[in-house]
Amino acid sequence: MPKTRSPLYLQAPSASLSSLSNKPSNASLSSLFASTSSPPTSRSISPSGESPAGGMVASHVFSSITTPGASPRVSNESKLDEVKELILRAFVPHIAIHASADTNEIANEKGFRGGFRELLRPFGDLVQGKVTVRDSIGASRTWEDFGVRFVGLGGSSSNSQAMGQGTARLEMGANGLPGDTANAQTPRSTLGIRPEGDIDQIEELVHRHLSHAEAVSGGYVANCFDYKGSVNQSVMSTSPFYALYLRRLLSGLPMTPHETFAHPVACIIAISSRNKSPIETLRQLYESGSRGEKRLPLWVNSEYLRYYVLVHDEEKDDIAQSTALFDQMKRHFGLHCHLLRLRSSQCVPTDDDSVRMPLSEWTTAAEDLSEIRSREAYEDMEVPTPCLFESDSTAIRTFVREMVTQSVVPFMERCVTTWNDQVASRRRGISGRFMSLSKRWTSFGTSSRTSSGPGLTGSSGTSSSNYDPLQGCYRRDAPEAMMRKLGDYAFMLRDWKLSQGIYELLRSDFSNDKAWKYHAGAHEMTAISTLLNQQTLSSKVRSETVDQMLETASYSYITRCAEPYGALRCLSVAIELLRLRGGSAADDAARWCSRLLDMRVLGATGQALFTERVSTCYAARKGAGSGRWGSRRRKSALWNILAADAWLKLGKNVQAEKCLDEATQIYNEIRPQKSNALAFDGMQTFMDDLRHALRANIVAIRGIDGLGDRLDGGGSPAVEEESEKLDNRRHRGSLIGGGVSPFGGLDAGPLSPMHMSHDEPMRKDDNFE
């Protein structure tokens, strides 16, 4: 073959970086990528990568919001894995916010164009102090990482969400005015933000973080190839990009009929001391949320807690009048009220008592992308640092803690007790089981196929199925819907034993009614609740219970419901919980991870991340004895190599180098006395091809001599020499029969075991003995 330089080969790896590298430095934009573009040893816990001001620490994809002078947070379980902690904090109670125009006006004056919700939102990620929760048997357990999620009233389908924080602040900086109160909350449709649970937007967000990390990779260490020497990163550590992917996957739980995690547990109805007719405004807000424009869909139970807040302006209003109004509110609405005292003036970093506003950890991928695009559009504008007066920060934290510990958690506990006694107990009893069987097999209950209509009750007393196939949901007062809400409340209160039992009861009901999305969700949450319980699970029990439930859930989500988000969330959470158990459960985690790759619900970035995660799952299997018998080190190294090839195809050279280094380290540990750590030549040839492709990509992108010797100890080849070596190797074949592609990977056929069917019988002519 003639030695020709391929323009595609030279330009494609840098295509994803060209848009970033050619733009002038934008500090405000770079701060959004600080959590993934800086090395683990020096990564600040602030998303901006800066030292927090005033003792207020912001968050990033790993950390939690901390308070000044607070001791480091220690979970109930010693050395709780960060990914498991992420999962626990993802399924939390959602609290809707319905504020009056004058309340949003105070937030606008303080610099928060998203209104009252934007002001409260970051403080719900972690409730200050310990939160005590009672389970179904009355036992109390204390949690230090309990949180809530503040959302707009109305859900993703009809909700007017708050604008992105950066977008609002940029627009405010552009015109210098706080903006119109009526436009303080902008509908998602006007921002081009799609509903939660969008895998494509998660892929795009993580891809942007990866591209930015590649563009600035030479800035945080001597060079990207010294990464293995400067950062002692274990094979078991979690990639910041994978943590970001999983967090954004769990951040935007969609509001759907088949699960109630995103349904509001409580609603904050807020007015301010500026209001001229406060009682009438409270009545209008209640009516608007119950039967007006802010009402929830019909399948959402409207019996959630109403919490009334009076926001007092410390600088303009009389506290005596506000106190009198607050006493009147308590007489009408009981103890679920709070007087929140705030200063209405905007705080700037130069103020003596200013503290930095914490950033919310649980933004959705759509919000993050909107923020990035906004800062790209205003790249020459300085983004002001959001700050609060220390008195305001303390008042908001006290308000959130009081509301959660004295109202929200007790309300959920009462609901769990009531529904468990009145609804679930009937289903557990002999009569409930008999009616469930008779509904399916005998004439004692009328099936949905012979009823006069779905969800209707006849005068004779016999009822059809409560499931409405036309609407795809149960009535909100149906026993099945109430029990699903019971299971979700128990799960959010971390009573996984009760939630597991409730979900198990519902599986057969949903199957009989052919409510397939409910059916998939019940199996998903049964498996997750089982894995979260502290009891040990043998491999046989996992195979007969957890594996079957995951199989049913993923099949129903993909085949029956066409819901790839549900299947991805189900398997990704189960994979992490299985991996944490170690032993044979780690093998199950790797197997399910490879099954997830087979389902083709992931984009290119997700494929590479989860291919790398298979290696981490195999690395979690610890062997016995000095020889580590039973470990999966060689499999872990193989999947690291496959992940390196996937990263090279995407032009992500730093990630590919990290995976290759980890694979080489594992092979050196397996055969330390051998000069060649690989057991057969094919693997060595394959790795050599990947290394040469990686070297050529770096030389083509950066145009710097002397990078090749940092890869394998060689000289300083130029671009022509690297192209010649690559052309010579392209047709030699490799471990599985492919050649190196122009993008740095293999361009022939299936590359990994992920493309082979697990159920395919072995051929008789394969010479296997």
Image (cartoon, grey):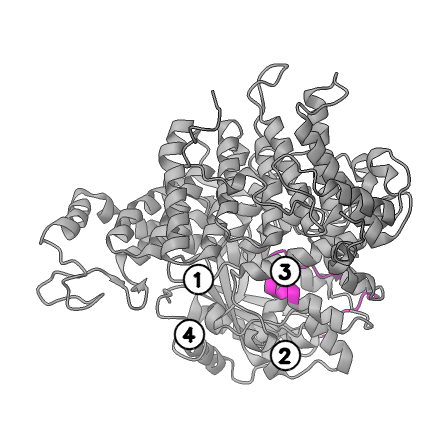
| Element type at mark 4 | loop
Residue at (38% x, 28% y) in the render:
540
Q: What amino acid type is highlighted by mark number 3?
A: Glu
User: Which residue occupies the foreground of this view, 723 or 456?
Assistant: 723
Is residue 47 visible in the rendered structure shown here?
A: no
* Residue position for label 3: 204
CA distance for labels 4 and 3: 33 Å
The main secondary structure of the magenta stretch is loop
Q: What amino acid type is highlighted by mark number 4?
A: Arg
Cβ–Cβ under 8 Å for marks 2 and 1:
no
CA distance for labels 2 and 4: 23 Å
Q: What amino acid type is highlighted by mark number 2?
A: Glu
Magenta region, residue range = 345-369
User: Which residue occupies the foreground of this view, 377 or 484?
Assistant: 377
CA distance for labels 3 and 2: 34 Å
On the picture, is 53 further left or further right than 602? right
Cβ–Cβ under 8 Å for marks 3 and 1:
no
Where, by quadrant of the figure, is residue 79 drawn? top right
Marked residue nearer the N-terminal end (4 or 1): 1
Q: Residues within 10 Å of mark 4 (few under 14, many from 20)?
A: some
Q: Mark 3, mark 1: which one is toward the viewer?
A: 3
CA distance for labels 3 and 1: 27 Å
- Res 654 label: none
Q: Mark 3, mark 2: which one is toward the viewer?
A: 3
- Res 263 label: 1
Q: Mark 2, mark 1: which one is toward the viewer?
A: 1
Residue extending furthest toward the front: 1
User: Which residue occupies the foreground of this view, 389 or 167?
Assistant: 167
* Residue position for label 2: 105
On the picture, is 638 further left or further right than 677? left
Q: What amino acid type is highlighted by mark number 1?
A: His
